[in-house]
Image: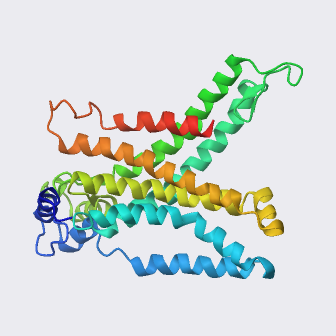
């Protein structure tokens, strides 16, 4: 952590406002700027939220499966929390924790809700297009007398990429659009300098303080992207572990936690895919135009994660 590169990035982050209470850029009110920096982050509040969830798990657990229920609950977020915190700790002087919290809950609430609705809609659309070959039934019209054709398997795989890959990775990436590398690049920055009515000015500041979050270095932005992946993965784990009736009943009856343990791999995959998109977005933000490594488009980084996610689900 004492290497020269990290010290330079730490100074860059501080010059742009991270962990610097004395700096308040022109055009920002101090309370608004603190919110954009990620202050306060209410870590105690979020810790109590997860602790309350543990008490709910204990309340609904059968007496002989109390430890299993707690283990299932811990598996919903344990891997994601360990992964993201370990990466953030290395760059903790560049990114305030409130930004991580904002990315986590944006992806874990709005992102999960939109992705669930769109995936549900797609699962009902594909069978109407082809009732014999779709993601939940990639077997063809003559199954089981004949094997599914290569065309049918390829078609169902492509639909999985469009569904799980495109929808979920896009939702996680949209949360990253909240990140701004500098005060000037924050959402709607500069609008406060224009002549507007006091009401519009107040509304503009409220929206900006709620939306924008400061990620002042490339490492900070990429680390915040990991938190976005962890948010969607955690809430998705709750669905698969506690609302998959067969897996839940098997865990309660026989103590089989294999389904919940398997979510560790899925959680890490979600985080890595969003991290890859975050690295590309950091290159787009921080490299100068014309640099050979700068992506052409802001969204270029999500193409590979979309493909990987879809193939993983296949």
Q: Residue at x 44, y 45 (%)?
A: 273
Q: Residue 310: where, in percent of width, then height?
A: 56, 36
How did the renderer colour the structure? rainbow
Residue 62 shows in the view: no
Q: Which quadrant is home to the C terminus?
A: top right
Q: Residue 296: where, in percent of width, then height?
A: 26, 30
Residue 42 shows in the view: yes
Q: How many marks?
A: 0
Q: Which quadrant is home to the N terminus?
A: bottom left
- Residue 269 lies, with reference to residue 70, above or below; the image says above
Quadrant in which residue 95 is drawn:
bottom left
User: Nearest the camera: 265 or 213?
Assistant: 265
Q: Residue at x 29, y 58 (%)?
A: 212
Q: Residue 311: where, in percent of width, then height?
A: 57, 34
Q: Residue at x 31, y 45 (%)?
A: 279
Q: Is residue 284 left or right of residue 177?
A: left
Q: Is residue 95 left or right of residue 139?
A: left
Q: Residue 73: where, in percent of width, then height?
A: 63, 70
Quadrant in which residue 250 is drawn:
bottom right
Quadrant in which residue 66 is drawn:
bottom right
Residue lying farthest to the right in this orientation: 145
User: Nearest the camera: 124 or 232?
Assistant: 232
Q: Residue at x 80, y 80 (%)?
A: 64
């Amino acid at each position: 952590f004492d290497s020269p590169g990290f010290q330079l990035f730490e100074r860059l982050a501080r010059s742009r406002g991270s962990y610097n209470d004395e700096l308040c850029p022109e055009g920002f009110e101090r309370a608004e700027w603190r919110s954009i920096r990620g202050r306060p982050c209410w870590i105690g509040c979020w810790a109590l939220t997860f602790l309350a969830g543990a008490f709910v798990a204990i309340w609904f657990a059968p007496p002989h499966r109390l430890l299993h229920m707690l283990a299932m609950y811990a598996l919903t977020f344990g891997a994601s929390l360990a992964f993201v915190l370990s990466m953030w700790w290395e760059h903790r002087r560049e990114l305030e924790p409130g930004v991580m919290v904002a990315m986590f809950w944006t992806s874990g609430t709005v992102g999960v809700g939109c992705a669930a609705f769109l995936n549900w809609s797609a699962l009902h659309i594909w069978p109407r297009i082809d009732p014999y070959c779709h993601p939940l039934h990639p077997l063809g019209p003559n199954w089981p007398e004949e094997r599914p054709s290569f065309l049918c398997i390829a078609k169902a795989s492509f639909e999985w990429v469009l569904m799980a890959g495109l929808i979920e990775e896009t939702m996680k990436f949209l949360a990253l659009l909240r990140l701004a590398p500098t005060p000037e690049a924050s959402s709607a920055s500069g609008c406060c300098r224009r002549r507007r009515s006091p009401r519009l000015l107040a509304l503009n500041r409220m929206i900006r303080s709620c939306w924008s979050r400061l990620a002042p270095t490339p490492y900070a932005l990429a680390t915040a992207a990991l938190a976005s992946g962890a948010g969607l993965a955690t809430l998705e784990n709750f669905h698969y572990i506690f609302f998959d009736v067969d897996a839940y009943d098997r865990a309660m009856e026989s103590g089989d936690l294999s389904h919940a343990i398997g979510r560790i791999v899925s959680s890490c995959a979600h985080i890595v895919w969003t991290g890859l998109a975050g690295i590309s977005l950091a290159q787009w933000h921080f490299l100068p135009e014309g640099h050979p490594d700068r992506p052409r488009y802001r969204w270029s980084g999500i193409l590979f994660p979309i493909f990987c996610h879809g193939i993983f689900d296949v």
